[in-house]
Image: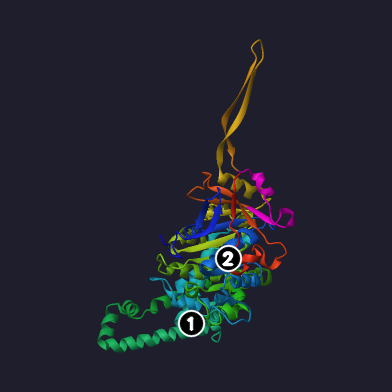
Amino acid sequence: MNIHPFSLEQPLLGFQSEPGETEYWTIANAVENVLILGATGSGKSSGSFETLVCKYLSAGFGGLILSAKSERKMWERYCSLTGRSHHLVVIEPFGDHAFDFINYESLHKPAGLSITDNILHVIRTVINASNEKDAGSSRDPFWDDARDTLIGNLLQLCQIAYGSITIQHLYDIVQSIPKDIGSRDEESPFSKALSIAKNKINQQIDEWEERIGPSVVQEYIDGNRFEVEAEKAIRDMRPLKMVDEFFTRQFIPLADKTRSTVEFTCITFLGRLMQEPIYSLFCGGRITVTPEDCTKGKILLVDLPIKTFDKAGRDAQTLVKFCFQRAFERRPVYNDTPPLFIFADESHNFITEYDPLFLSTSRSAKISSVYVTQNLASYYANMGGIKATAKVNSFLSNFNTKFFHANSDAETNRYASELIGEAYDEKPTHSFSVGRDSSQSRSTTPELKRVFRPEGFMRLMNGGADNNFVIEAILHRLGKPFTSGRNAIKVLFRQTPNEASVQGFPEQNKSSCSSPKPTENKH
């Protein structure tokens, strides 16, 4: 039976177990998400990660790439080796490509959600992710609610006044909110925006009154229904009234310390977006690449490494990831729909509150998220707070394939060992009887033992000449067991000596970027 290249049953990897037998890891396994854990120098990058990258690219996947350090040259090499160079799109400082997220989200809002609510959702998600990484999540929710309310009203004011939303307007307005009602500067961006919005609504009221006629207007006034009927006819009248009341009655009168804390969070985040090259790439009005391009095979690399651009680079990549995740989920999916990927190296930097929900439904959307990090501590540190354990456990449960490379982190190794589980092993026993009729007997008794003990992960081979260029990993897959009857096997990846630029590829296979099939090593 012929299998469509993009069918869930299509094999991507083959594991040679028994002689003449090959077990397959398919697109279905891929879209149930992959987690790769391994210490620095464990071989995870030139082992399981590189193998998956090349298999995905060779199979025609499109998608998104995030990283903490610059990986452009590496991905250019991968795309060249798989014949996908023409699909690679790079968002980089002063480059040709840009993605104005506000313009995009304004045009692609989910049904039933306003433009302002949609953009607020994006901004809130990115800020929450940033705050959680910087300070944990034990903070009083009041501050998050107050911040979201302020941003929501800024968005609403900007939309009503100017008919669109820009980071420049938001930044200017939030910095010029008066300290008290009596000190308002009529030339400030805040006052100008509010004045423009009110003038627009007043003009719409005048036009509405002209349409319905003076007799109806008087009838509404006499019946104390004028404002109610006007709000029904003029969509932005009630929202502007709420915006005005928020600033004049709630926000401006706030105590200085409370207000400054809320303002500072907004100004800090918007300020990072205002800096170059972030502003030109994500807020400057240009859109040259979209999530829809990835569904047609494009491979987007956001080359704004955190090591260079710090929090601004992290926020920008997180923002793109969230927008692309939601867009990927919106597309219709059929048997012949090409799968998509999100590769996130040092993935703990890009986790958001949306990830568990996204990962839990990615199979139906044919999206494979491949997250790479050193150890579980990285996730605990970036998903902090009193619910950190529950958050991390929920997050980890959404990766049905896990590669465990060499690691010295005790907690990660315990987790892997417990996940792989226990099995009965036959323990030999000996019995002796001494006397006139001495005898001895041998037998076995079943003993429940860990299949792979925690300390065993420290001894996994990590490539290089000392290990004959062999990398080992323990692969755990949910669902169908391997021929051993277990859900975990040891797999080997072979590096290529003397080919530092093409690690993991034998000379004869470099053009197709086809790593040797990982082999099962029973344990």
Location of residue 404 with respect to 150 vertically, above or below: above
- Going by the image, does 336 lie left or right of 507? left
The numbered dot on residue 260 is: none
Residue 177 visible, this orientation: no
Callout 2, which amino acid? Answer: Cys
Magenta stretch in the rendered image: 452-472
Callout 1, which amino acid? Answer: Leu
**Badge 1 element:** helix
Residue 442: percent from left, percent from top: 61, 25
- Asked whether 463 falls inside the magenta stretch, the response is yes
Q: Quadrant of residue 75?
A: bottom right
The outermost residue toward the front is 20
Q: Which residue is nearer to you in this view: 384 or 284?
A: 284
Q: Which residue is mark 1?
A: 194
Q: Residue at x 58, y 65 (%)?
A: 54
Q: Residue at x 61, y 29 (%)?
A: 428
Residue 511 visible, this orientation: yes
Q: Which residue is nearer to you in this view: 380 or 1?
A: 1
**Label 1 vs label 2, nearer the camera:** 2
- Going by the image, does 168 lie left or right of 69? left
Q: Quadrant of residue 308?
A: bottom right
- Going by the image, does 347 lie left or right of 207? right
Residue 267: percent from left, percent from top: 59, 74
Q: Earlier in the sequence, mark 1 or mark 2?
A: 2
Q: CA distance from mark 1 to mark 2?
A: 54 Å
Residue 187: percent from left, percent from top: 55, 87
Q: Which residue is mark 2?
A: 54
